[in-house]
Amino acid sequence: MQSDLKASVIISTYNQPEWLELVLHSYGIQTEMDFEIIIADDGSDERTKRVIDKFSAESKLNVTHVWQEDKGFQKTKILNKAILASNADYLIFTDGDCIAREDFVETHLSLKRENYALSGGYFKLTEKISNSTTKDIISEQKCFDRDWLLAKGQPKTFKLNKLTTSDFKSRFLNAITPTKATFDGMNVSCYKSDILAVNGFDERMQYGGEDREVGERMMNNGIKFLQVRYSAICVHLHHDRPYKNTEAEVLNQQIRATTKREKAKWTVFGIKT
């Protein structure tokens, strides 16, 4: 389906309706509103559907809820379904626990380049601040305000620079950061054609680096990754990681090692099986 939408924002989620409600609110107040939202839902219950339906009814944004039955961690599978459901030729990937600053979509679109993917970062809020964040706080952009966060007890670290609003400072920090530009599913964007060219996500992959692997195949296929972690800003709400397990990490490491060794550009375990 051809579309004149500037972007499709793909938000992955699983049974975090309270967080998703805040995240969707952050997309309802973007400075650039010519985009759609695709919710990649890995088997959430009815609470999540209610949040999405309520937001859809109140928002001018087109929202598509792509859901699959809960059969354990199958994030890569639902992301592939979300890619196929998207209507724009540019995709922004993020998670349902990452609140976007009001210029998030605009920034991704202003920095996009042919044959490049944009690699953003995220700033982790403390558990206390996460639990006290409201729609009003997001509307007023307080959760992106360094001084407000410090006053609320956020530790003072260099990472607060991830919230800079200075264009000069963000470009400078993007250029000098030692952090490698990768496909981090919390904040990354690319042309739809570039991720389809490598057959999307490898659906064998479990929790832990599952998003990095598709980026590695994209790199093998000639796509460069551009560092935008100090430009495209989102804050990450605190939560536990129930899916973390050693067995899954070993499997993922083996798949990534094969991708690297063989300089793989395609997976047979992707969108086209």
Image (cartoon, rainbow, N blue to C red):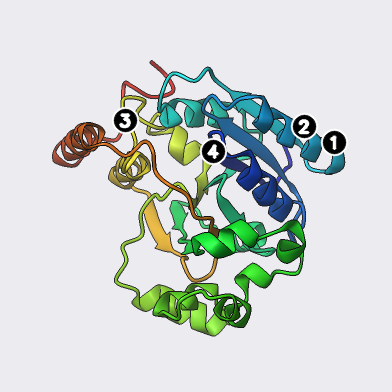
Mark 1: give few (<14), some (14-19) or many (20+) Cα within 10 Å.
few
User: Residue at (57%, 79%) from the top-left corner?
Assistant: 146
* Residue type, label 4: Ser
Q: Is mark 4 on a helix, strand or loop?
A: strand
Label 2 vs 3, first from the N-terminus = 2
Disc 3 target residue: 205
Residue 211, image x, y percentages:
38, 42
Residue 151 seen from this side: yes
- Asked if the residue at tag 1 contacts the one at tag 2, i.e. Cβ–Cβ closer than 8 Å, the answer is yes
For the residues labelled 1 and 4, the Cα–Cα distance comes to 20 Å
Q: Name the residue located 67 percent from the left edge and 30 percent from the top edge.
A: 47
Residue position marked by numbered label 2 in the rendering: 53
Is residue 31 or residue 162 the one in the foreground?
Answer: 162
Q: Where does residue 200 sit, x and y in percent of width and height?
A: 42, 32
Residue 237, position in %: x, y?
53, 55
Tag 1 and tag 4, C-beta contact below 8 Å: no
Whichever of labels 3 and 4 marks the residue nearer the N terminus, that label is: 4
On the image, numbered disc 1 is attached to which residue?
A: 57
Q: Is residue 187 left or right of residue 247?
A: right
Can you tell which quarter of the image residue 142 is in?
A: bottom right
Could you tell me the amino acid type at mark 2? Asp
Query: Residue 12, which numbered label?
Result: 4
